[in-house]
Amino acid sequence: MDIDEYDVVVAGAGTAGCYAAATIANEGLDVVIVERKDAEEAGHIACGDALKGADAFPEAIPKDRLEPAFTNTGVDHGRFEIPQEDTILEIPVPGELAVIDRWEYGRQIISGAEDAGVDFHYDTVINDVVQDETGRVRGLNAVRNGDPVTYATDVVIDGAGSLSLLQDKADFEGTTFDTNVRYSQFCSAYREIVDVPEPVEWDDALVFKATDRAAGYLWYFPRTATEINAGLGFQMTEEPMQLVESLKKDLRDRPEFEGAEVRDKLGAALPTRRPYDSAVAPGYMAVGDAAGHVNPTTGGGIAGAAYAGKYAGEQAVKAISDGDVSEENLWRYNTRVMDHFGGRYAGLDVYNVLATAVDVDDLMGLLASLPGEKLAEALYEGSTSMSFGLKVKAAIKSFGYWGTIRNFYQTKSLADELIGHYDEYPTSPAAMANWTRERDAIMDRVYETTGADAKY
């Protein structure tokens, strides 16, 4: 069996993996990305194609490298269609927003990582994680182009996506690595790239539409005025074919899609859960979807993955320089993720919990009654506030949904409290047990208030 030695081995050529590897290579270390797809298919990932915050991406891959993938930079708001209320909500989206060609974006970040000095091994299927007698991760066993190979390394960075196989293979006993992970915390996504004969009127908006179940929604994101990413997201606990039929029926019923041609179909899984409590173990870090680094209310994960890759790459470089790749010495990666976006995403997840316990018609009625700018804050920031005047107006509009709106504001208070608790995320693994105990007590009150089943 061949043995390939690298300072760092990264699993997966997605956003998190490429940014992690480029960050490491830029510091002069030897790093390889192992990718199960071939060179042509690498970067071809099911995605809504909406990208928020690209103006502030990490510098490991130059921003101008991404520009060829930007197909629509004119989008500036969300358009929420609520047929139950015969309402369309136009909701501003804070920050820079664009729609991209995800496959082209994938090619560009791979090319940018190559320019930084990253090696790529395609057609490589990982089948095991190598650990020593202490539990420290030492490498990976894989099959490359049909031949077995072992990768020996100081640090493995797991960017292998949702429900990563590596986490099934590794033994995390005795570490803080989050193993409280199950399929019901994830969403299945399916999307089609559709060419329409005439320009759509809403090419400046990201269009969302609820299905008849709270656990699913449709999206229409315009790559251009005539090239639409039409997709569906739904919790894995739902029956997939029934919800895929919801998308197909809506496509048939929308006049702007008459005579449309479908060019590409693809599905994937993504986390609709809080970020992993800890994504490190001795010699091992998880990044991006593999660590729950996705906004659980919108499904947006590109920006979070890029920064998780940067933070993991920088911590890997430091740990290798120190000659210490222990959980303790990798821990700062966790704190940087939580400080940047992890706590906010955990707060947003509380609204997902609420949605599982609310009747879909009541939920849509509630959304239709709230001011659009406040919905935007809730969707992207995890918290919102309203003046007395706005509260009065919302109360008048929401007559008939007061029970639901009261539940929403009670849940909002708990989401705020949870975000505050994440501001106190521990600075070392030794303090993790007490912090987790207090966090779980807040979540118990979330379940009690919403009436939802426990998610974790």
Image (cartoon, rainbow, N blue to C red):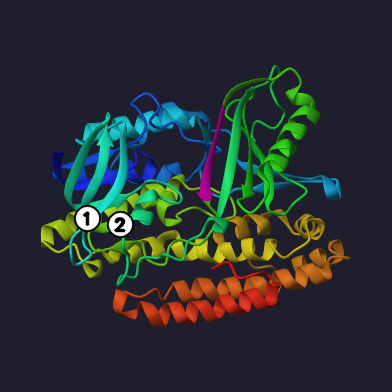
Which amino acid does the dot numbered 2 rest on?
Answer: Met
Q: Position of residue 358 (x, y in %)?
A: 75, 63
Q: Residues within 10 Å of mark 2 (few under 14, many from 20)?
A: many
Q: Nearer the viewer, mark 1 or mark 2?
A: 2
Of residue 348 and residue 179, the one placed in the foreground of this image is 179
How many marks the image carries: the answer is: 2
**Location of residue 441 (image quadrant):** bottom right
Q: Position of residue 285 (x, y in %)?
A: 30, 57
* Residue drawn at 46 percent across, 61 percent down: 275
Answer with left or right where residue 277 lies relative to residue 27.
Answer: right
**Location of residue 333 (image quadrant):** bottom left
Residue 382 visible in the current orientation:
no
* Residue drawn at 40 percent across, 32 percent down: 43
Of residue 179 and residue 383, the one placed in the foreground of this image is 179
Answer with left or right where residue 426 lies relative to residue 9.
Answer: right
Q: Tell me: residue 367, above or below residue 431.
A: above
User: For mark 2, what is the residue?
Assistant: 285
Magenta residues span 265-270
Answer with left or right where residue 445 lies relative to residue 451.
Answer: left
Q: Quadrant of the N terminus?
A: top left
Q: Position of residue 73 (x, y in %)?
A: 53, 33
Task: Kindly check if marks 1 and 2 are in contact, taking CB atoms under 8 A apart as contact.
Answer: yes
User: For mark 1, what is the residue?
Assistant: 316
